[in-house]
């Protein structure tokens, strides 16, 4: 009789732990699925009004640290223009306190600053020792980047004439041939978003366009404030996308490099 009782106790114990092992993950999954829509609505509102080009991910594909609390994170949001990352609890603080052109990362326990334009990285303790010659020169892609100071000077012009743009181009150095990137995210193998993010990080985000959001004729308006004949256009998409852009260039009678 005692033997049967012990067997029953073992049976019920095993049944209890099996039930717990099965039900707990299911309940957690259900709870997360109910919370996800609320979280998405909140984040979408923040992303729409935020200063950064935020994108949410459920899993970062490499070791990532939050730019606010410096803790490792698995899921959260990243800006596809400047590259900062933040977990859900820190997204609002990151958007409020970190400008879109400053990046703070963590490397071997030390805080670093990385320039989004030239990609140079400097430790926090070394930043004060930088000299004028060490300031940003836009890095290896300087010949194709539209610098912020060029656009600033264009906005100050009283007379918008091609000759004035050519004079301003001297500020950008010899051999300056800015590139406009026009990508169709609905074309190909759906890698357009990743491609746009890479170009926005390396170039000025104002010269990178998603053709699923605006037509080529709108994107190519940027050519009208650049020196005639100096612009190159990179089209990312299929034959239809290329033809679409070429038609717009022909209609606008633009001169390309």
Image: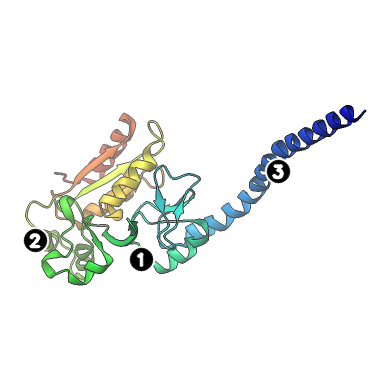
Residue position marked by numbered label 2 in the rendering: 170
Which residue is depicted at the point 14% across and 64% down? 134
Q: From the image, state whether disc 3 or disc 1 is nearer to you.
A: 3
Q: Nearer the viewer, residue 170 or 195?
A: 195
Residue position marked by numbered label 3 in the rendering: 27
* Number of marks in the rendered image: 3
Q: Give x and y (percent) for residue 201.
A: 30, 51
Q: Which one is earlier in the sequence, the residue at label 2 or at label 1? A: 1
Residue position marked by numbered label 1 in the rendering: 99
Classify mark 2: residues with Cα within 10 Å, few (<14), some (14-19) or many (20+).
Answer: few
Which residue is depicted at the point 73% across and 40% down? 20
**Gap between marks 3 and 2 measured at Cα:** 64 Å
Which quadrant of the figure has residue 11? top right
Q: Is residue 66 visible?
A: yes
Q: Are the residues tagged 3 and 1 within 8 Å (C-beta)?
A: no
**Gap between marks 3 and 1 measured at Cα:** 40 Å
Q: From the image, state whether disc 2 or disc 1 is nearer to you.
A: 1
Quick check: 31 above or below 104?
Answer: above
């Amino acid at each position: 009789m005692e033997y049967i009782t012990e067997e029953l106790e073992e049976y019920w114990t095993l049944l209890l732990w099996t039930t717990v092992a099965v039900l707990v993950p299911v309940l957690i999954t259900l709870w997360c699925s109910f919370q996800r829509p609320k979280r998405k609505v909140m984040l979408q509102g923040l992303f729409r009004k935020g200063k950064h080009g935020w994108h949410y991910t459920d899993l970062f594909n490499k070791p990532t640290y939050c730019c606010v609390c410096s803790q490792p994170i698995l899921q959260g949001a990243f800006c596809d223009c400047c590259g900062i990352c933040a977990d859900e609890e820190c997204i609002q603080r990151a958007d409020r306190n970190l400008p879109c052109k400053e990046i703070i990362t963590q490397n071997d326990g030390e805080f670093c600053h990385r320039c989004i334009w030239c990609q140079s990285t400097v430790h926090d303790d070394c930043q004060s020792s930088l000299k004028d010659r060490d300031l940003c020169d836009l890095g290896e892609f300087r010949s194709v980047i539209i610098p912020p100071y060029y656009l600033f000077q264009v906005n100050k012009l009283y007379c918008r004439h091609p000759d004035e743009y050519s004079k301003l181009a001297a500020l950008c150095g010899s051999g300056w041939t800015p590139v406009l990137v026009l990508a169709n995210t609905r074309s190909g193998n759906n890698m357009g978003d990743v491609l746009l993010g890479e170009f926005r990080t390396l170039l000025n985000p104002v010269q990178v366009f998603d053709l699923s959001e605006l037509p080529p004729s709108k994107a190519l308006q940027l050519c009208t404030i650049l020196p005639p004949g100096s612009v190159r256009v990179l089209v990312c998409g299929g034959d239809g996308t290329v033809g679409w852009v070429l038609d717009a260039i022909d209609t606008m009678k633009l001169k390309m490099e």
